[in-house]
Image (tube, rainbow, N blue to C red):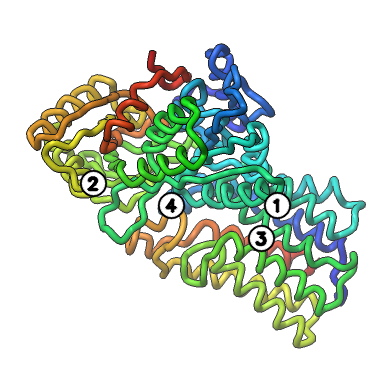
Amino acid sequence: MKKFINDPNDLTKELLLGMTKAYPSKVKLVEEKLVCRAVEKVESKVAIVSLGGTGHEPAVQGFVGEGMMDVCAAGDIWAAPGPPTLLSALKQVNRDAGILLVTLNHAGDVMSANMAKQMAEAEGIKVEEILTTEEVRPTEDEEGRGLGGCFFIYKICGAAAEQGKSLEEVSALAKKLNENMATIAVLSELATHPSTGGVCGELGENQMEICAGQHGEGGGVVMDMASSKETIKILADKLVEKLSLKSGDDIICIVNGSGKTTLMEQYIAFNDASEYFAGKGINIVGGHANEVLTVQEAGGYQLMVLKADAEIKALWEAPCDTPGYTVK
Amino acid sequence: MSDFTKELYIKMLTLAADKIAEEHEGLSKLDAATGDGDHGVTIHRTMKAVKEAAAAASEKPLADLAKDVAMKVMMCDGGSTSPLLGSYIMGFGNAAPADTLNAEQTACFFEAALTNFFGISKAELGDKTMMDAMRPATETLAKELRAGSDLTKSFNAAAQAAAEGAEKTKDYVAKFGRARTMGERAIGHQDAGATSISYIWGAFAQACNG
């Protein structure tokens, strides 16, 4: 492993310090693990809180800021924060307007969120939770994990909260987004765990894995490497099927690089995706091609699609200002 | 040995932390086969906190000591390991009427921890998780203690059951955690979490052995 790091035990601490020092007008660090907005949102508006392991930068803590998330409880490398850290995050923005808690469907995150939510409710904190499950799995009976799709929730629910929508409305919107979004991952090279240097998973030299999930946990479909155009067709076919997309539908499409795959490749993939969807009469009304949720030096990307109506489209275009994503 | 004491409990937790410190690299390698390869890192960090918190709270009553340890574990930010082991140890804190426990109280002490653990884990036997070592170990311990076996014999039998339970996870398809998406491909790989739990029970037995 060749990484510019210091003590492997201090990766999370140092990266959070670095991120908040790099963007002091957007975010600040509270209690070592809580990334908060530099300028707090007024209490009359719903707060958006999320949790997650680190080592996925810019996700998830990089989406704290105006127009997106209010507080993020960071864990450690690829590991969810414990319930007390998340409880602190919820207390940080406790308000009568309520809190939307965004949890990605991974075992540790779900357990921590359940415990923290119970503790928060016992203290009278008003919380609604959305569990993101948008990952496309090889077979239909498998429950999907939460991959990069949390980004859609942060952005769009964040904008709705900023407009003064109620917790009921923001929560209903989050459910609608989770039902109308889908993400599929392709992995071409394995990540190493930055604390241990251990390689995660197995993959042949000239192979790629479809439905690879987040960290290279395995369980996807392994096949020979293919061109960008061929790969996009494999991935996008699955998304179209999952969301029952048809000619005339509007979508927001994101190519989310996993870490090693270059921006050049992500743009090529986006071009191929846009030609693919145009060929089916599906309109891309919003797009993004860049790293959203990475896994260290994993090769590959997540293709993310959200079926968009007028409400979603307007909220997608609303301004936001975070270390990881800005709309003016 | 007949009565279970607070001192023995602290010794058990300390030896368990030492065992995990020795084995954590191997545990990460086991986890890399079916998960994301960091189980050794998180369990090591968690058990280090257990050892430190137990030492810091050694003067407190057993129930308060266990609750202190549990809170420190949950604050480790170690993915699923924090809530799982945190609630397990919190369970001890709910079932410690005194600092010295008789056989029946000791059985109840460990059963209460298992109940709390199950409340978070929700895993059944055969799901290829920590539960595959935790449940047989606890049930064996309680059975031996209630049959009149002394602590040493009971904990040795429990450790044996934990090791067998961990070994059996090689035959299972995972239903939880990151390994669950591997389906049949997980067969042949021993679950890292169950292996950790078997090491911990091995250390519990070692603490009784002298």
**Residue A213 position in % (x across, y down):** 35, 45
Mark 3 lies on residue: B200
Left or right position of A192 against A13: left
Instruction: Locate residue B122: give its quadrant.
Output: bottom right
In this view, the mark in front (3 or 2): 2
Q: Amino acid at mark 4?
A: Arg
Q: Identify which residue is drawn at 43% across, 33% down.
A: A157
Q: Are marks 2 and 4 on the same chain?
A: no
Mark 1 lies on residue: B17
Q: Identify which residue is drawn at 31% across, 41% down.
A: A181
Disc 3, SS: helix
Q: Nearer the viewer, residue A155 or A32?
A: A155
Q: Earlier in the sequence, mark 4 or mark 3?
A: 4
Q: Amino acid at mark 1?
A: Ala
Q: Amino acid at mark 3?
A: Ile
In this view, the mark in front (2 or 4): 2
Asked whether the residues under the numbered discs 4 and 3 touch, taking CB atoms below 8 Å apart as contact, a structural biologist would say: no
**Residue A22 position in % (x across, y down):** 53, 13
Distance between mark 1 and mark 2 Cα atoms? 48 Å
Instruction: Locate residue A147: give its quadrant.
Output: top left
- Can residue A223 be seen in this snapshot? no
Left or right position of A265 against A130: left
Distance between mark 3 and mark 2 Cα atoms? 46 Å
Residue B39 higher or lower than A283, as above or below? below
Image disc number at residue B129 = none
